[in-house]
Image: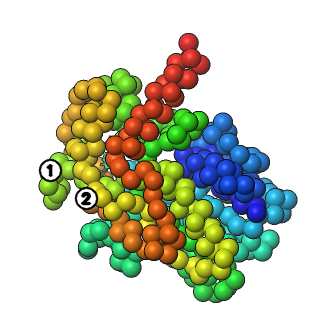
Amino acid sequence: MKVLVTGGAGYIGSHVVKALGERGYDVGVYDNLSTGNKWAVLYGDFYHGDLNDAKRLEEVIESFKPEAVMHFAASIIVSESVRDPLKYYFNNVSNTINLLKAMNRFNVKKLIFSSTAAVYGLAKKIPITEDQPMNPINPYGVSKMMSEMILRDLSIANSEFRYVSLRYFNVAGADEYCRIGQAYKEPTHLITRALKTALGQYKKMQIYGTNYNTADGTCIRDFIHVDDLSDAHILGLKYLMEGGDSNVFNCGYSKGYSVREVISKVKEITKIDFPVEEVAPRDGDPPVLIADSTKIRDFLKWSPKFNSLELIIKSAWRWELKFKEIKDFIEN
Ligand code: UDP
């Protein structure tokens, strides 16, 4: 079966491409390499292209002939979205519309969509179930909410079009053989920043906000290993192929860790102490995001293999060590 993966050279996309390839799917990757890397595409055909380039996109869909699309290509940094909302509405909403138009033109009717826990924003009840209202507090979350609404309306207007939207909580970790992992030029995510600080690539770690209404005053997040998230995509795809209706699923382990807890776990695992500075809160950060993952476990029979913060950090640490080795080799 042929699957086109937008953003398949990025962090999460490349892990899903790996999972698809390992299971025998025929993969096409469509990526503009703005944040992704061609070396991260372990399987399939690579098509360089931008979602804003309708001609190129249509040409690729017409020649590759996918039966389904997985759509990862997006901008994903909360703080950047607060500073530059238009970038987020353009890359995440406009480009999703471009993709849907091209899919429609060539009769591709199934989509797995990368959504986010940021759509919940200030959730009323923790852990968060999928039926809670979307209440995003940053442009990134709004852009994903808008895309979800577009998908919903499209599936109502055209009953043949079906989608699964996966709302990712905080994704971390890397391939077990360290072939791929997070490789952003300017990483902003908590675990990656802490590991790179342990490696001496940053002088200190900053905690954004210590007066939240949580046990230790710092934000709480639910971390999920990228390979478990990849499995969720495969299950979502099978569900659609077997005739499942459009649906939305949380992807998380239903366990939250505070920023302080994550940093001390990183110190424990790396056995490296590093300076930590407490600074002002970052704009747009919801205090607590913890998934209720009952629905995906029941509906898709998702059964995570790496659900421990320790496993996630160890896996990310192995990758950071290898990535540093490769970078040092190239640079010297
Ligand atoms: N965070 C932090 N210092 C950092 C990076 C992140 O204190 O260097 C906090 C951030 O404010 C948020 C949490 O860690 O409360 C998770 O942030 P991340 O960027 O990893 O993911 P997000 O939840 O924003 O998608």
Disc 2: CA contacts within 10 A as few (<14), some (14-19) or many (>=20): many
Question: Residue at left 21%, top 34%?
Answer: 277
In the foreground, 296 or 161: 296
Disc 1: CA contacts within 10 A as few (<14), some (14-19) or many (>=20): some
Q: Looking at the picture, which amino acid does disc 2 mark?
A: Pro
Q: Which is more foreground, mark 2 or mark 1?
A: 1
Q: If the image is split into quadrants, where does the C terminus sit?
A: top right
Which numbered disc flags the more N-terminal residue, 2 or 1?
1
Number of the label disc, if any, that sits on residue 216: 1
Count all numbered tags in the image, as a single digit.
2
On screen, 26 above or below 106?
Answer: above
In the foreground, 24 or 128: 24
Marks 2 and 1, Cα distance to the nearest angstrom? 12 Å
Q: Say which quarter of the image contains residue 133.
A: bottom left
Question: Residue at left 76%, top 61%?
Answer: 2
Question: Residue at left 51%, top 21%?
Answer: 325
Q: Is residue 248 visible?
A: no
Coordinates of residue 196 in the picture (x, y in percent): 39, 30
Coordinates of residue 258 in the picture (x, y in percent): 24, 50
Q: Is residue 296 visible?
A: yes
Q: Residue furthest right?
A: 63
Q: Is the residue marked 2 within 8 Å of ligand 1, measured from its CB?
A: yes
Question: Residue at left 38%, top 40%?
Answer: 313
Residue that numbered label 2 is attached to: 287
Q: If the image is split into quadrants, where does the N terminus sit?
A: bottom right
Coordinates of residue 181 in the picture (x, y in percent): 52, 39
Q: Say which quarter of the image contains residue 268.
A: top left
Dot 1 falls on a residue whose secondary structure is loop
Q: Is the residue marked 1 within 8 Å of ligand 1, measured from its CB?
A: no
On screen, 269 above or below 81?
Answer: above
Dot 2 falls on a residue whose secondary structure is loop
